[in-house]
Structures are given as structure tokens and as C-alpha cells.
Amino acid sequence: MTDRYAVIGNPIAQSKSPLIHAEFARACGHAIEYGRILGPLGGFAPCVDAFRAEGGKGMNVTAPFKLDACAYCTDLSLDAQLAGAVNAMKFEGDRVWGENFDGVGLVRDLELNLATPLQGLRVLVLGAGGATRGAWLPLLRCRPAELVVANRTVDKALDLVSIARLHLPEQAQACRVRGSGYAELAGLSFDVVLNATSASLSGEMPPLSAAVFSPNALAYDLTYGKGMTPFLHLAQEAGVTRLADGVGMLAEQAAEAFAWWRGVRPDTADVIRLITVPLA
Ligand code: NDP
């Protein structure tokens, strides 16, 4: 029987995961089935139970079920535990393995696809929701000179600083890790500014001064497929020429999941070309 996988979310029609995994499977010569499942709100567990009962091998998980998936898994990777969120599951008998590949996907996109090794750079992350929680320790492991997280709800940013000091104390000390609100960013500038808020989804942006971008900064919006978001516009108006959205992160986290399930890591370049919406 062909191995079956799926992405679960609500809504789910917009998901590019079936297209991405079909392309990976074709390129690697693997025969798999990869579908999309509209998970009922409040009904995540029975829906996944049914997929497993039909022989499903693994799932990607998207909003709003990443926390439900974390509770559902029997075994969690460290990144998934610390994120409190799971974006990929693997089913083996009674065991359900949970992973969070958002962080590694982001880091690979920044460091490999966009040729921006983070070591020694000043990195600012906007937002302290699920995406930042998944990316936080992978970012810190890259040993930036500074890692600052700013969030509307400041406590969530401070929580991430505590997580860094608890789990990667050496790196947290070597790299100046800080959390704050937006007002405290006055007078600071950064080499890499990552917009990990969901503001771009509704055409909004965090209250950010254009002065946060250093002259050669990379401005990166984790939201993808929206063209020039207000955040990217602000960066462009500030003279930033290196602009990117999260399409590469999406492809890279998918490639990690494919490798985890299938034992071979597909190349992402073709998929990134296929799903990129030009920033115009
Ligand atoms: P969450 O809902 O978990 O967190 C949302 C964050 O955005 C919170 O920090 C929230 O602040 C902040 N926020 C929302 N609206 C505003 C606003 N108007 N002004 C300032 N801050 C705001 O979302 P996720 O972390 O899961 O996702 C964030 C973004 O990342 C989404 O756009 C998502 O599509 C994208 N993403 C991209 C991925 C990729 O592969 N490229 C993977 C995962 C996510 P507060 O805490 O104060 O409410």
C-alpha cells in the first residue's frame, strides 16, 4: 500500500504542503499519497485517530492545531517541547513522535538560501507567538552577537529570555539575549529583522521604527505569499534592499519533515521557485 501522509489545519484549502510534498516525492522517486485534512475545531484527536487507523504514516500540522498536536504526541523532540507546539508527527504503532521544524527551516533559509550566517550578527525578532517559540533556540544556537525579541505582550518576550537562559545558558550569556516591548527598541539597530508576528496576515504591522534596520540589513517576514507586506514596505522605504518572505522557511521545514519520514532530504530550490509569489 502507498504510504499516506497529510496536513491538518482549519482552514486548510490554502495550504501549499500537498504541492510541496508531491514535488519532493516526484524528485526523490518515492510513491506517496499526501492529502489535506480540514480538522474540526475542538476535534483534533479523533480526526488524527481516524487517519492513523486508516494506516496514515505521518502528518504536518498547521494553525490552529500545533498545541493540540503537542498534547497528542507520546514522544516530543526538545525543540517541540520548548516550543510547546508540534508541526510534524510520525506514527509508529502506539507511538506518536512530535517534532517542530519551523526553527530549523527558518535558520536554513536565512543561512543557506539567503547566505546570511547569523553568527556575530545582531538579530531582532518581532512577535513571541508559536513561530518564534519554535525558532527561538535554533536561532540562539547560531550564536548571533545579540538576539532580541520584542512583543506587544511583553511577558511572552521575557518568557523566551528565561527559556534561553535555562536551556542554552552558555549561548545566552555569550550572545546578549533580551526581551522587551516595541518602545524599548528606540535607538537600536539590527543586521537581521524577522517579522514573526501574524500582523502581515491582516495587512497590519507592529509599531516599529524604520531606524531598527541597519544599512545592510536583511528584512524577513515569516508570512509568505502576500507580496510586499507593510513590514517589508517599511524596510524598503528605510533603504533596505535585502527583503524576503517566509516561503523558503516553509519549503525548508517541509524538507525536514520529508527527510524525517522518508530517510532522504529533498533539494528545495525547485519547490521554492514553484511557490514563490514575487515581492512586488
Ligand atoms: P501566533 O498567533 O502564535 O502569534 C502571533 C504573534 O503576532 C504574537 O506575538 C502577537 O502578539 C503578534 N501580533 C499579532 N498581531 C499583531 C499586531 N497587529 N501588532 C503587533 N503584534 C501582533 O502566530 P504564529 O507565531 O504561529 O505565526 C506568526 C506568523 O508566522 C504568521 O503570519 C504565520 O503565517 C507565519 N509562519 C510562517 C511559517 C513559515 O513556514 N514561513 C511557519 C509558521 C508561521 P501578542 O502576543 O501580543 O498577541
Image: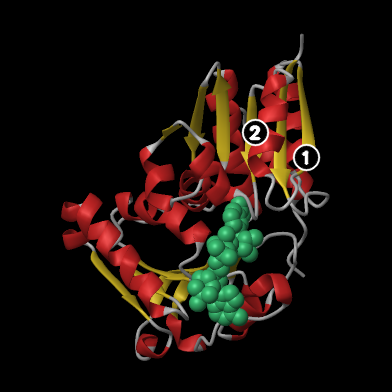
Left or right, 223 with reference to 104: right
**Residue for point 51% across, 86% down:** 208
- Where is mark 2, residue-wise? 59
Residue 145 in the image: state x and y as whole percent: 27, 64
Total marks drawn?
A: 2
Q: 157 above or below 180?
A: above
Q: Residue furthest top?
A: 1
Q: Residue furthest right?
A: 13
The answer to whether residue 98 is visible is: yes
**Quadrant of ligand 1 in image:** bottom right
Residue 27 in the image: state x and y as whole percent: 72, 23
Q: Tell me the CA gap for discs 1 and 2.
A: 10 Å
Marks 1,2: beta carbons within 8 A? yes
Task: Mark 2: give few (<14), some (14-19) or many (20+) Cα within 10 Å.
Answer: many
The answer to whether residue 221 is visible is: no
Dot 1 beta carbon under 8 Å from ligand 1? no
Q: Secondary structure at mark 1?
A: strand
User: Where is the N terminus found, in terms of image quarters?
Assistant: top right
Residue type of the residue flagged with mark 2: Met
Q: 177 above or below 23?
A: below
State the image quarter where residue 184 is shown. bottom left
Left or right, 163 with reference to 3: left
Q: 125 above or below 31?
A: below
Residue 42 in the image: state x and y as whole percent: 68, 51
Residue type of the residue flagged with mark 1: Ile
* The disc label shown at residue 37, or none: 1
